Amino acid sequence: MLRKYFQRVGAKRVLMTVAGNIFIGLGIGIFKLSGLGNDPFSGMNMSLAACVGLEYAHFQVIFNLCLFVVQWLLGKEFIGVGTIVNACFLGYIVTFFYDILYGLFGEPSMLWLQILVVCMGVVICSFGLSLYQTSDVGVAPYDSLSLITQKRLPKIPYFWHRILDDGIAALVCYLAGGIVGLGTLVSAFGLGPFIHFFNEHFSKKLLADKS
């Protein structure tokens, strides 16, 4: 069964979703290094993990397993190899890159450096999201929530479903003592144009290249 699945989706799509998650993890690690906030879901998991005394990566896997139950019951069509890669490994990828970057550079102490780091995170995270989304081999449990609610309430544009999910995650992050700042706002609202750029100029062309 698994062999047939991988034959159907193709090795290129699988490699794209793996590479995409690696770049996403690097981007999130850079956002964390900036000290100006992460994307709402990562920020929420980091702050909740600190509250309960668990490593962020371990906590994220546990939280994703809970969300996966919802995805399995209400959105099986959104499950694929990309779901597993993102849900099980992204937190560890983030931790891996953050520890390296923090050990090499430390956290930036000046605002202009923090903003520069956020800009770097935007570009890298957008590139990773472009690869991950274009591969189209399953979405993360958290990402599936807005797709599931949009499917059941189709008259409400997807944008508002996603904003509701991110808004709740950002609120939980703030209440749990996490940072909600420039990095959070950019992650929630500002990645779209960069993702579109990479989709048109790289990811779609990579997927279409049969050579």
Image (cartoon, rainbow, N blue to C red):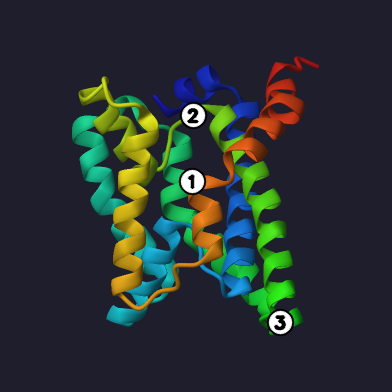
Side of 53 where 32 appears, left or right? right
Q: Tell which circle, 3 or 1, labels the residue nearer the N-terminal end.
A: 1
Residue at image x 63%, y 57%? 27
Mark 2 and mark 3: Cα distance apart in space: 40 Å
**Residue type, numbered disc 1:** Val
Side of 95 where 198 appears, left or right? right
For the residues bearing labels 3 and 1, Cβ distance under 8 angstroms: no
Q: Tell which circle, 2 or 3, labels the residue nearer the N-terminal end.
A: 3
Callout 2 crowding tier (Cα within 10 Å): few <14, some 14–19, many ≥20:
many
SS at badge 1: helix
Q: Quadrant of residue 25?
A: bottom right
Q: Name the residue under label 1.
A: 85
Residue 161 horizontal/vertical position (percent)? 31, 37
Q: Mark 2 points at which residue?
A: 137
SS at badge 3: loop
- In the rendered image, the vertical position of residue 101 relative to residue 1, given as above or below: below
Q: Name the residue under label 3.
A: 110
**Residue type, numbered disc 2:** Val
Residue 143 horizontal/vertical position (percent)? 39, 41
